[in-house]
Amino acid sequence: MCGIVGYIGSKQAQPILLNCLGKLEYRGYDSCGIAVSSSGIETCKDAIRVAALKKAAPRLGGTAGVGHTRWATHGKPSQVNAHPHLDCTGNIAVVHNGIIDNFQRLKQQLTSEGHKFVSETDTEVIPHLIEKYYDGNLEKAIEAALGDIEGSYAIIVVVASESKLIAAREDNPLKIGIGDGEDFIASDVPAILDYTDRVIYLEDGDISVITAGSIKIKQHGTEVAREEHKISWTVEDAQKAGYEHFMLKEIHEQPKVIRDTLVGWVSGEPIVDLAMMRDAGIEAMLVLACGTSYHAALVGKHIVQELLRIPVRAELASEFNYYGHTLAGTTAIVITQSGETADALKAMKRLKEAGCQLIVITNVVGSTASRIADQTIYTRAGPEISVAATKSFMAQLMVLYWLMMSYSKIEARRLASMTMELRQLPVKVQQVLENEDKILACARYLSRYEDVFFMGRGVNYPVALEGALKLKEVSYIHAEGYAAGELKHGPFALLGGNTPVIAIAAQDNTYEAMLTNIREVKARGSPLIALAEEGDEVIGELADSVITVPKVDAIFSPVVNTVALQLLAYYTAKERGCSIDFPRNLAKSVTVE
Ligand code: AGP
């Protein structure tokens, strides 16, 4: 999964390409490169970050060009495998995001026709295919080349002495930014917000010819119109707003994100087409996702059980894709922040084929997932730059609470009190954020350890999983989330002075059982940090340290508990000097299986 950009206009392309690329590193950052076109094509690329390329690159003259920041799938991060890739003449340069499944066969065929390959990448077949079909009509050559390709792609092509860029997508995001006498192309909106807020979303199968000031889009050779969107996100949104890291900024955005996500619905706007759902009759529900979104799905499962009292399964999309089956009349909900996660998209296609009612909860307008689903519910978390998902998780929970409350079979008084409580959540979350000092002290303590357990029960078991995932992702501490009742069935063997345990002690029907588990952990010598509600007199006696969270209705406890654990992971990683926004080996959305 990579980030690609293009610029064509009257200004020097190099600084603009590098600036846009810098905003896309959350999509992959193991190598990068640019190519600028004037009479010829000049490139500069290496297995370095964009900031280093800015320093290393010689001046490349020209007002049109392409750029790429990489997350390797084929060929290790290296100068030769970095993009852009060229054809034999060196006049055709291509940047690509996606995977070409049949590249080996194409490479053999092209090699037998005399083409010389220099990299291990799948992408390099594209410029060679274009060269093969090029007879002066670049558009035709690209159409023919794409005709040979099997797989997913978003590409931008620049050719020496042709004052145009050509962009095409199949199963990977690509947007065009409209400027004044200049145009921009990018995998994602934050890259171009410095220059324009007018954006066109390319659709699968679109091929677009872009010159300085004109944009033509074709589908199967026929010109098509695509809607122009005005992006309400400010450049600031895409930048850190004064926080040291995007992760901390995004954690602090959660009160606003909760309000923004709920605002439409609590004022009566239907969350989804009720008619469609009611007619379908919700007999069973299946919630699918990956990573943090899967933890939201697990919380969702508890909410469905409590409010709808119907059979519900929460499944990992990557597992579902290889054995999953669906009951007739299943309403399927797929949760994906980016809307581009390959495992989730594959599951969506399977669910569609199985005739399920398919709802997607996603944060990215125009994402591929929103095109596949019958109904799309957008979380309003804004751009999430930090690889570690935080505010998007919160927005997903809000959607699940409201969706299930809209269908709940519980008595009206309970529903009314829940609605009241939901409206209070931004304030409660703000209280957790103001308790940062206490969490920082626990983080200083935790940062000395290499192995940590999180334990929770009921609706907070997924929160233990999420707390562990956040700590793993950003601090590189080996952390495991466990159902508290399960530790005695094995993991107890790992407890002791070097293995702290974080216990989520929510004031619900699991509280007494959790106190027993805390005593069992203490008896085996592990340091224990408890996450407990303010006013809990008992917990202080048992735990070495207590992080208090505000009182909320038990069903909403995952909201305040998760924010506390996000901060704990952030400050622990900070204590350990980790690269918090761009953790090693990870990327923001994983578009490969
Ligand atoms: C979470 O912090 C990670 N970035 C990762 O687990 C992520 O949740 C997962 O890849 C799913 O992404 P999605 O929600 O965009 O589909």
Image: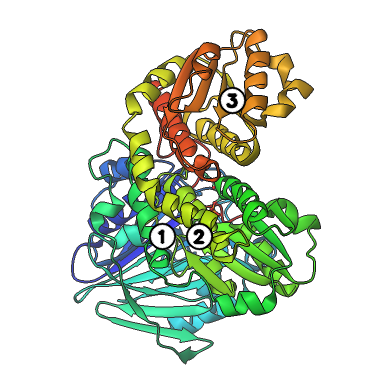
Q: Residue at x 59, y 59 (%)?
A: 411
Q: Which mark is residue 344?
A: none
Query: Tag 1's secondary structure?
Result: helix
Measured Cα–Cα span from mark 3 to mark 2: 34 Å
For this view, does 71 lie left or right of residue 348? left
Residue behind mark 3: 478
Give the residue type at disc 1.
Leu
- Residue in front for this viewpoint, 223 or 128: 223
Nearer to the camera, 133 or 269:
269
Which residue occupies 68% across, 15% down? 520
Locate residue 190: give its quadrant. Answer: bottom left
Q: Residue furthest bottom?
A: 222
Would you say 587 lies left or right of 34 here?
A: right
Neighbours of disc 3 within 10 Å: few (<14), some (14-19), many (20+): some
Label 1, label 3: how many angstroms apart (C-alpha)? 35 Å
- Residue 66 at x, y percent in the picture: 36, 62
Residue bearing mark 1 = 262
User: Which residue is labeled 2 in the image?
Assistant: 402
